[in-house]
Amino acid sequence: MEAAGWSVTVVDDNAVTAATAAGAGLVVISATSTASAQIATLAGVSTPVLTTAPGFLDELGMAGTGGANQGSAVNQASVMVTTAGQSHMLGAGFPAGSVAIASSATMTHGWAKPNSNAIVAATVVGDTTKAAVFGYDTGATMVSGTAAARRVMYPLSGGLATNINDNGAQLFDAAVAWASGKSPKIAYKRDATDRITERTVNARVVARYSYTASGDTSDLTLDGSNNVIEAPLALPGGALYTWRSTTPVWSYANTHGDIAVTREHRRGEARPDQGL
């Protein structure tokens, strides 16, 4: 939070009242909090609230009570980004599908069942009825009551905080940004010729760019751990094949040399050049 430019004030959960939220840009409820009665006083505040523990969702009106409506996804280090999440800020720019959010092979994270007014950005792997990342916009009717400001659930529970990876941090940054309406803090590093070599979000490296020639177009894009995530390859006839760790893309130029058509190459499909 501080890396994103926030001034953070820590309040003991037993001391929380509605007045705690006064003047704040965002209230983040820690997964280690236990004072349900005190947390419940935040239900009607006109300050955005982000909870990282599913156990408080009923107090906040975001989900129902009991184990049928909220719980933990045991031994799951990934979430499933939904089609809605793919096109919404809460999805952090990830394509729909499985996204690993923890460095540990086995992890536990929270889930809940909001109503149909919620924006569900990610679900539990193997159970689309259990939302892992979701939010209600201001004025939305929740399971109980109306959202006086944006309300967001991010599953930073079950030990995930100590095992969160870059993907998980990216989803958390997106949850904070959407809930608060405050954009992430983005910065760039450049080389001696003014080419971008590194991109950071909230002081966390999300991409590095490698060049093999003097041009401004990078030949490789790497993540913060220096794993290659994208590599473009120019082909005869003006076509461009962009290898990506998620879904490779074929791009075709028109007679003017402008990209006119792009096509994703999904795993298991024949390549677009096969059979031509």
Image: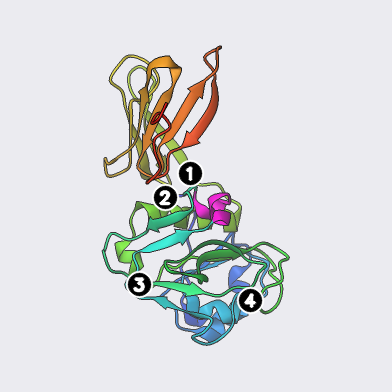
Which residue is located at x 45 percent, y 55 percent? 97
**Disc 2: CA contacts within 10 A as few (<14), some (14-19) or many (>=20):** few
Q: Which residues fall within the magenta stretch?
A: 83-92
Mark 3 residue type:
Thr
For mark 3, give the secondary structure.
Answer: loop
Numbered mark located on residue 185 in the image: 1
Asked whether the residues under the numbered discs 2 and 1 touch, taking CB atoms below 8 Å apart as contact, a structural biologist would say yes
**Disc 1: CA contacts within 10 A as few (<14), some (14-19) or many (>=20):** some
Q: Is residue 61 above or below residue 100?
A: below
For mark 4, give the secondary structure.
Answer: loop
Comparing marks 2 and 3, which lies closer to the viewer?
3
Instruction: Name the quadrant containing residue 39.
Output: bottom right
Q: Is residue 252 left or right of residue 194?
A: right
Q: CA distance from mark 2 to mark 3?
A: 26 Å
Numbered mark located on residue 267 in the image: none
Q: Which residue is mark 2?
A: 3
- Give the prevailing secondary structure in the magenta stretch: helix
Q: CA distance from mark 1 to mark 3?
A: 29 Å
> Can you give x and y, in whole percent of width and height, for residue 255 in the image?
55, 12
Q: Which residue is mark 3?
A: 108
Mark 4 residue type:
Ala
Which residue is located at x 60 percent, y 69 percent? 21
Task: Specify the quadrant that holds the C terminus.
Answer: top left
For mark 2, give the secondary structure.
Answer: loop
Mark 2 residue type:
Ala
Q: CA distance from mark 4 to mark 2?
A: 28 Å
Name the one closer to the observer, 51 or 109: 109
Which residue is located at x 40 percent, y 30 percent? 275
Q: Is residue 4 above or below residue 138?
A: above
Find the residue positioned furthest to the front: 275
